[in-house]
Amino acid sequence: MCGRYSIYESMDHYLKELAPQQLVINGYDLWAIDRYNVAPSTRVEIIRPVEGGLSVDKVRWGWSPFWAKGKRPDPINARVETVTSGKFFKQLWPNGRAIAPANGWFEWVKDPDDPKKKQPYYIRLKSQAPMFFGALAQVTPGLEPNDQDGYVIITAASDQGMVDIHDRRPLVLDPSVAREWLEPDLDPLRAEEIAKTLCRPTEDFEWFAVDRAVGNVRNQGAQLILPL
């Protein structure tokens, strides 16, 4: 996890759930984002803390430190077990904390009768409320994209029934915890505690098989998240 996800409501929808009282210092579109199949290396909206409030930025999904550029594809995820202490994400932890809003994510499960085939599943909250993925991001202020910028989604180990779908899952935070995650002066030890202990429990989620069309990054549309 996680290699594809959806974000299809308007940004206003996510912000009202996340931080209705906080000031958003930059403009954002009020119409639906309509991204049902977000793939690595594409630019998509994230939310991050800045002086005076929150900022919504379209950032490329995937990031590497400057010394690792070109050696391999930019990672899109960061394991919670090592992100706070490893060398690779040292530049982003803990001051690069951000939130990637979403409606759900996809995982692929091998067909027991044919290992060459994989069945995609869509995972969302049972309430169908917005999700808030804990993330780390590098964002350079300015109107033009910067090649060094990007973000990664933090992942945790799956448990209970979800492990049958995949052994990893995104760090999904409750709205109140996500707000705390975005506090600029959050103590690094508290940030680490949030990342390692406050992922929403498995019982908050539901998952179901969806059409294999989601495997093609060019495909979009609400039909990709309909149960088979």
Image: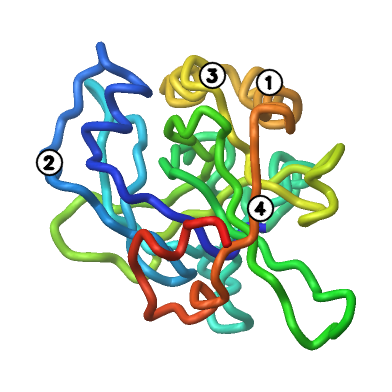
> Callout 1: 10 Å neighbours few (<14), some, many (20+)?
few
Mark 1 vs mark 3: in front: 3
Q: Earlier in the sequence, mark 4 or mark 1?
A: 4
Q: Position of residue 123 (x, y in %)?
A: 60, 48
**Residue, far front:** 228
Quadrant (top left, top right, bottom left, bottom right) of the N terminus: bottom right
In the rendered image, which quarter is residue 121 located in? bottom right
Could you tell me which secondary element the residue under label 4 belongs to? strand
Name the amino acid type tagged 4. Answer: Ala
Q: Is residue 166 left or right of residue 112?
A: left
Disc 2/disc 4 C-alpha distance (Å): 30 Å
Residue at the location (88% across, 75% down)? Answer: 112
Q: Earlier in the sequence, mark 2 or mark 3?
A: 2
Mark 2 lies on residue:
30
Mark 4 lies on residue:
78
Between 104 and 20, the residue placed more toward the observer is 104
Mark 3 vs mark 4: in front: 3
